[in-house]
Every structure is written in C-alpha cells, then in structure tokens.
Image: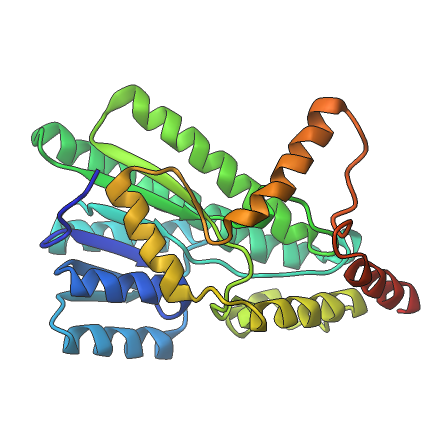
Amino acid sequence: MITNFKGKTAVLTGAGSGFGLECARIGAGLGMRLVLVDVQQDALDAAAHELESAGAQVLAMRVDVSSASQMEALGAAVLARFGAPHFVFNNAGVGSGGLIWENSVKDWEWVLGVNVMGVVHGVRVFTPMMLAAAKQDPAWQGHIVNTASMAGLLNPPNMGVYNVSKHAVVSLSETLYQDLSLVTSQIGASVLCPFFVATGIGQSHRNRPADLGREKPTKSQMIQQAMTGKAVDSGKVSAADVAQLVFDAIAGRQFYIYSHPKAIRSVQTRLEDILQARNPTDPFADKPQIGQQLKDALRAA
C-alpha cells in the first residue's frame, strides 16, 4: 500500500475532467508528480496549467487510450521523464445508452475501445514497469485503479453497450488483483464502481472520433440520456468526494471502491437471481414509477 504519496508519480487518464482531474488535484496537494492524459486538448491544457500553478511537476499528453501505439508512446514518455509510475489510474471512459440491438457497430467499437481497451493498454503498458521497479527495490510500492461503474456489477436496461464494457473492466480488475497477488506483494489493484456522479461522461459524444461518424441518436438513446442526466443532476456525491475515496482505498489497500454503498443491495439481488437460477429481478422494483416511465417512453417511440 502507498501511505506516503509525496514525490510519487501518478498517471491519470481522463485527467481533463471528472474523477481524473479531482484525483490529480489531490495528488498535487500531496506532492505527487503528475502525468495527465486526455483526448480533449483544451481540457488537458487547462488541467495542466492549474496543476503546474499549484506547484506540481506535470507531464501532459493528448492520448487516445483506445490506441495501442499511443498508449505505448505514453508509457515510454513516462518512463523517460519520471521512471515507473507508482499510481496508475485507468479512468478514461465514455457513456452510451439505448436498446442493445439499436447500437451500431461503430457505437460498440467506440465504447469498447475506450472503456475496455483503454484499461487493457494501461495495464499491459504500465504493470511490467511497476513490477521491474518493485523487483529492484523491496520498499517500492505501487497501485493500479481501474474505473468501472455500478453498471459493471448490474445490468440496467437501455444501456447495454456501457454495461458490457464496465462488466469487462470489473472482470479485468479482479483478475489483475489475483494475478498480481501471485507474483508480488508490492503492487495493489482496485476497481472504482461509481453510481450517478456528475463527471462530464454524459457529454461523451464531444470526444467521439470523426472516423466513427456522428450518427443521429436513436429515440431510445435520447430517452436514456435524458434519464441519466436527471439522475446525475439529482446526485449528492461529487467527483471530488469519489476522488478522495480512491486515495483512501490506495492507502488502505481496498479493492472495491463504491461511491454509493447502498446500491450494493441491487448487486445482492442480482447475485441471488444467479444463485437461485431465477429470472432477472425488475431493476425498478423499488421505484416502479421510473420503470413505468421508461417503458411508456420506449413503447411510444
């Protein structure tokens, strides 16, 4: 576990906003060296300026995390500037909703490319560096945090592509935890599973690559975007709150990080469905009016 962050290096993807930016702010306050990664240049520039002004050493790079070559170039740049990173936050992500059969191939390529392959590349690029550093120094400590979602533990309707991507991140992270435990006690892993928190992910299409096209959203996608936006806007947990939970989890070597612990009751219900081989429980059983609104909206589409 890392208990003293001063002088340590953090690599944060999605650092221009949301959890990435808030973790960078905490890291700067703790005296960390920061590698800021984002695909949105203006947000990246603003974050770099803010954190350099706060006194942090910063390496800022515009990177599409879905690109293997760009992530490998990032890894080489980090190693050359700061050495092996102590904290890797594979956090960049995009959102997408709609009925699962209505998502286009390009929707799938974009969401899985960022949400899944972005984490894959972060793990495969940085973990070997961290293991090499740990082997050279018995006192060296590192930690990897991957951002999933409560949608990685549940399967809410009308957001299938996102669910699939986040289930993959949970699986990847649990496997990473187990694999690391086989070879070292110096590097930990965690998975972040936030619920509805305002981060900017609801406006993900602003960063959709041009070669994937600006497809007109389907009616079900527009319905989901409106419902998610309402849930996010009514939330009381901030991105800054979640960022502090991330640092607490690193210091405490805690694997699962939840922004809304009460949501775990729904996970328990899902697991009971599986154990009892019963059909999936209505996700709106405790809020039937919301479920009826969604059903009415979709059937009227």
Q: Name which residue lies at 9% across and 54% down.
A: 7
Q: Quadrant of the N terminus?
A: top left
User: Would residue 96 be found to the left or right of residue 129 on screen?
Assistant: right
Q: Does 289 appear above or below 131?
A: below
Image vertical order of residue 189 relative to residue 119, above or below: above
Marks counted in the figure total 0
Residue 185 image offset from top left, x and y in percent: 22, 26
Question: Which quarter of the picture shows residue 295?
Answer: bottom right
Q: Is residue 4 left or right of residue 150?
A: left
Q: Nearer the viewer, residue 177 or 165?
A: 177
Image location (x, y in percent) of residue 155: 68, 45
Asked if residue 170 lies left or right of residue 121, the reply is right
Query: Residue at position x 40%, y 55% from top?
Result: 91
Quadrant of the rendered image containing residue 251: top left
Residue 32: x and y in percent read 15, 58
Q: Whole-percent x and y of residue 114?
A: 49, 55
Q: Residue at x 78, y 65 (%)?
A: 220
Q: Residue at x 77, y 37 (%)?
A: 280
Is residue 214 something one can see in this rendering?
yes
Name the foreground residue: 236 vs 60: 236
The reply to whether residue 72 is in sight is: no
Position of 44 with respect to 156 (left or right) is left
| Residue ranking furthest to the right | 300
Q: Quadrant of residue 46?
A: bottom left
Against 185, is 209 above or below?
below
